[in-house]
Amino acid sequence: MAKRLHIKHGATVYDAMLHELYLKETGAYLFREGDIVKANGATYPILRDTGPLLFGRSTGSSMQLTWGYNDTLKNNPVIVIIGSSHAVSLNLSPPDTMQYKLQQLINDNWGGATIHNLGVPGEYTDHWLPTELGGLPDRNIDAANSYNPDIIILVGPTNDAQYNTPEQATANLQTIAAAAKGKFFVHSPIRRGDYDANLLARLAAENVLWTAAFPYVLFRLWDILEDPFGPDFQSDHIHLSPQGTTKQADAMFAVLDRELRANTAYLRFDLDRSDDGAGGWGLFDQVVDQQVIRKTFAKQPGYYRMRAALKDGSYTAYSNIVQIMNAVPTANAGPDQNLPAGNTSVVLNGSGSDTDGTIVSYLWTVISGAGLTLQDANTPTVTVNGLADGQSYTLRLTVTDNWGASGSDDVNITVGAVSAAVSQFNFCASPADIPGWETIAGQPHLAVLSGSHNGITVDTVATNLWGNLGGTTASDVNGEDTPNPVFAFNAEVTRSFFFTYSNTYTPGNENVRISGFNPGEVVPLIEILGSRDAAGVSFATRLCDYTLVDANGSYLVHDFDVKGNTANLVTYQDMQADANGVLLLAVYRRLPIDGNHEVGYLNAMRITRNI
């Protein structure tokens, strides 16, 4: 429901729509002094010199401004009348005089006025000129100005036709008007019965010229008092009767009321706008139609005020200031993303909306999380690269509307951590119970050795026989050597081993099979421990190679020149199993040590997978 505006006018309270400021009693879009206007939680008492009241609202992409204004005249305005016999209503007394009747009309409609009448019978326009131009000091425009008047009325004489041409009389009036310090009004000539045709023609010409010179402030009695021999005139056919002064006062008040009330005294309304309401005010619109009290514009958020330009060149006070708000746009960064391990990028689809404008820009930024790069960060859809397993990230989408307001929304991205499955195998001459390890043990010269741990099976390939088996965890202590602690192989595994007399490696000559992987699975890490001296073996140097073949048939070779009691670690990373989930390993000697001993050693194997 729209808010309502309550207007108390006298003893009557009007209830009108906020944007329909219509006073039922007056039929005009006006406020009067003494009105109290309540709207939007604020009270606006209408006092003298109150500027317009301004109200505003916005809907979608449009805004509506509505105003009302005070039509009250200044309290008890000062009015000075200068002129001749028609100014003083010669031969009449109150209540029949023009001044008395005009005073009553002003009292009834304006609440009062102070009237000073400087009229003297027999005068003409030369007498009312400024003193320096020959005017009568006590009766001219200078005398009228001494009262600090709000209004000066010149009741034009019929005598001028005898002394001045119509043009001269008009020029005198213009000089007097220019010197006036109050709002200036002119009484038109009136016909008189004692004039011949020539003088009447002069009066008619004066009327034409004065109408053209003073179109808005002329009391047009020439058209109202047409017959000097009728009841509107006294028996001298020159001066007005009580009936004539009534018509005279009515016509004068109608022009005064029309011109002095704000709704017709205004030339226009000037509507100003400011970005912040504190300064930088500039003209936004001008309204010259007095009946327009509401306008709809394309929405421009900011601050607005209004004042009226008056016909006398002055301005009313400024209205209250109205703010038209810009709705903040809404950003939507989309739902949070929970990604499984292994995802390094994700596409985010965002959007923005604005109830009273348009979205003009998008911007994605990283709020938390390292190592990310953003592709198309200035569009609704962004590609996020550089995600890492086990990490969380927050991104923000900021949208900006056509008036510079911004709204943001965050989205969280969580990448699952990698779970590792480890399979560990210990190769030795006899079974051993090492916690966390699968022992692959056997007697010398057995063709097949096999064991499984955590879903992975390691066995020997029958066609590439192992030549011998050595050390046990209990007895093989002479050859013990602590490996690099980073590799975390315990001493028991280091001591146990077996070896082979296999030939130098050629493709297809592998002697260890590792199976149980998913087809095509990439294995992050395979660690092989081997190439150490056994107790009782005195060879000074052992030369051993390891070759692991991946799914594409390519292979990686690690070789060692081993001297003394040394255990060596070989690592393979990101090797891909074949379509059957198998990787093949060759353990062999690189060069013969002597004619009888060409050996390669294998102590242990550890396989780490992502699951």
Image (spheres, grey):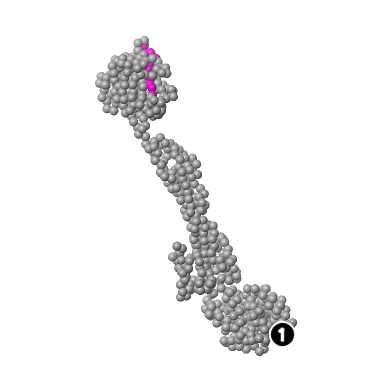
Q: Percent x, y for residue 590? A: 39, 16
**Residue, x 56% and y 73% (percent of image)?**
261
**Of 540 and 510, the residue lying toward us:** 510
**Is residue 589 rendered magenta in the image?**
yes
Please state the extent of the stretch shown in magenta in the rendering. Answer: 583-594
Q: Which residue matches tag 1? A: 195
- Indicate the secondary structure of the residue bearing disc 1: loop
- Give amino acid for label 1: Tyr
Q: Percent x, y for residue 597? A: 35, 12
Q: Percent x, y for residue 96? A: 59, 86
* Res. 220 visible in picture: yes
**Of 283 and 291, the residue lying toward us:** 291
Position of 417 with respect to 32 (left or right) is left
Position of 131 with respect to 547 (left or right) is right
Q: Residue at the right extreme?
A: 198
**Is residue 38 rendered magenta in the image?**
no
